[in-house]
Amino acid sequence: MSQNFARFIFGATLLFFCAFFLWPILQILKGGFIDADGHLTFAYLGSVLTDPLYLGGLANSFGLALTTTILALLLAVPLALVTDRFLFPGKSLLSALILVPLVLPPFVGAIGLKQILGQYGALNALIIELGLRPSGWTFDWLAANQFLGIALVNAFSLYPIIYLNAVAALANLDPAMNEAAANLGCTGWRRFYKITLPLIKSGLFAGGTIVFIWAFTDLGVALIFDYSRLTAVQIFYGLKDMSGNPFPYALVAVMLFSSVTFYALGKGLFGRDHYAMMAKATTLGGPTALSRGRAWLCTLFFSTVTAFALLPHLGVILVAFSSDWYATVVPTQLTFHNFELALGHPLTVPAIANSLKYASISTIIDLILGLLLAYVIVRSKIAGRQVLDFLAMLPLAVPGLVLAFGYLAMSQEGKFFAFLNPTRDPTILLIIAYSVRRLPYVVRAAVAGFQQTSETLEEAAQNLGCPPLKAVAKITLPLITANLLAGGLLAFAFAMLEVSDSLVLAQKQIYYPITKAIYELFQLLGDGKLIASALGVWAMVFLGIALTGLTLLIGKKLGALFRV
């Protein structure tokens, strides 16, 4: 690739990020810190930080994110250690089932959990059946502590992200280090704390950052639980009055600053240390065979965590198959009718077509941009190419709700991008939003492919008279196809089920994607909840197939795609 072409890609990509990543963020800051006369003001920010309602929402959001991340770490790290160190019955199957919570957006899983833990849900029915409470007894487990309920739903949905990173980090450790520590008398928890944890903390940070930001800005689960005392929900309700109200802008700015500050602090505290491993492991290592009893204890531990993680999915599936589920342990009547309605309802049919269109186009954009960016980052020598790498990864650290609000702000009437106003047609903005949000996965996968493919292969082809671009197309591209397929498949799958952008930008029914359709169906009386669950199961099947394909393509390296 010529330096001129590399510079052209650099400039074009930088322009794209300036227009659709930095500019929306700038509009948020402008709305929250510039008054009607065009002067800088901190009055709106001061009002937000002193208003008990907004301050309480921020405190709850931070507490929810912290609780979710701690719970996810407590689930993921022990599972990763058991997977890395021991052999036990059912290990392959249980390791595969770890990914299942990722096949359903947390807010859809919340529908199933409400059915199980609600006032007339399955748990209360089971308690009555066991004779622990009299007939007619009710208790709303979720209403008793909505905060903890949301944290549990998010933790059980997102802990696989930390698990994938932890497994990848543990796989890179030289077993000789643990053996040396053991020989010196450092064993058990002390060895984990002194040796293993410092070596894998960057991987844990990579996954923990995404979980924290995801939970901090989560919108869907809180809406399903009808829990409004969170900043994300307050912003969502403030969208109706954003043209004349500066407080939603200030709230979004605070959310943005909080997310970036957390990322920066974590990067400074945990991202600086890099411990060198030997080029090759100095000992064979590998999982250890356990006694029969201990091996089955590992299986039981894995199975128990997986069962709890899959409880929301089980609830959604049972709701989808039921004609009515009220005050019984399981539905009394099962039917496929809801699945037929889900594929024939006037709200769902256009939504499926819309999601396919938005996700397909955005994935094509991501593949083209990701391939070009990765080549410039890895192969070119132009100054500033690391800026592209930083910008390409930054969308993982910036909440989706913040970007969606920024797109709304920059497309208001009278603004330069007013022609993209989603109140008329959100198609272009949704495609751009999906592209920007999922581009990091493609770039990460493509960069890994280029780094693993020797540049000497391209140089040999060029020495034989093959032009640089043709050498890339004929030699390198076929070798990194699996990486591109993995990144593209992940980008497509998560674009199909994107929540924040879909709920905020899709404001007319004709343009609803799948997730917005599920949310609207859930609020309908009658069979709306049943159809929403059936549509959620279809989405679950789709994303499950996608993640299975990803696992087959790149295996344990899947965790690297979830790093910031």
Image (tube, grey):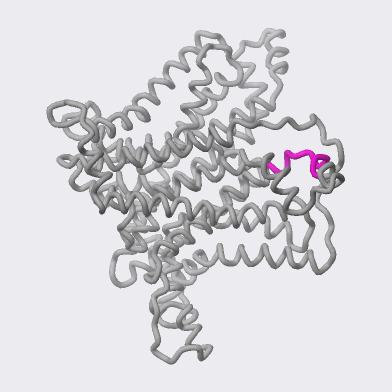
Which of the 4 image quadrants contains residue 47?
top left
- Nearest the camera: 526 or 10? 10
Q: Residue at x 50, y 40 (%)?
A: 491
Percent x, y of residue 252: 31, 41
In the image, is 560 to the left or to the right of 219? right
Percent x, y of residue 34: 20, 30
Percent x, y of residue 89: 77, 63
- Nearest the camera: 294 or 540? 294
Q: Is residue 380 magenta?
A: no
Q: Is residue 232 above or below residue 381?
A: below
Q: Is residue 209 above or below residue 393?
A: below
- Nearest the camera: 173 or 66? 66
Residue 489 seen in the figure: yes
Q: Is residue 19 above or below residue 264?
A: above
Which of the 4 image quadrants contains residue 452?
top right
- Give the main secondary structure, helix, strand or loop, of the magenta stretch: helix
Q: Is residue 411 above or below residue 163?
A: above
- Nearest the camera: 395 or 511? 395
Count how many numbered circles sit on residues in the image. Answer: 0
In the image, is 440 to the left or to the right of 413? right
**Residue lying at the far left of the rendered structure:** 37
Q: Residue at x 36, y 43 (%)?
A: 401
In the image, is 35 to the left or to the right of 310? left
Q: Residue at x 50, y 26 (%)?
A: 390
Q: Which quadrant is home to the N terminus?
A: top right
Percent x, y of residue 57: 32, 52
Which of the 4 image quadrants contains residue 449?
top right
Q: Residue at x 61, y 17 (%)?
A: 379
Q: Is residue 176 magenta?
A: yes
The segment highlighted magenta reads 169-178
Residue 555 seen in the figure: no
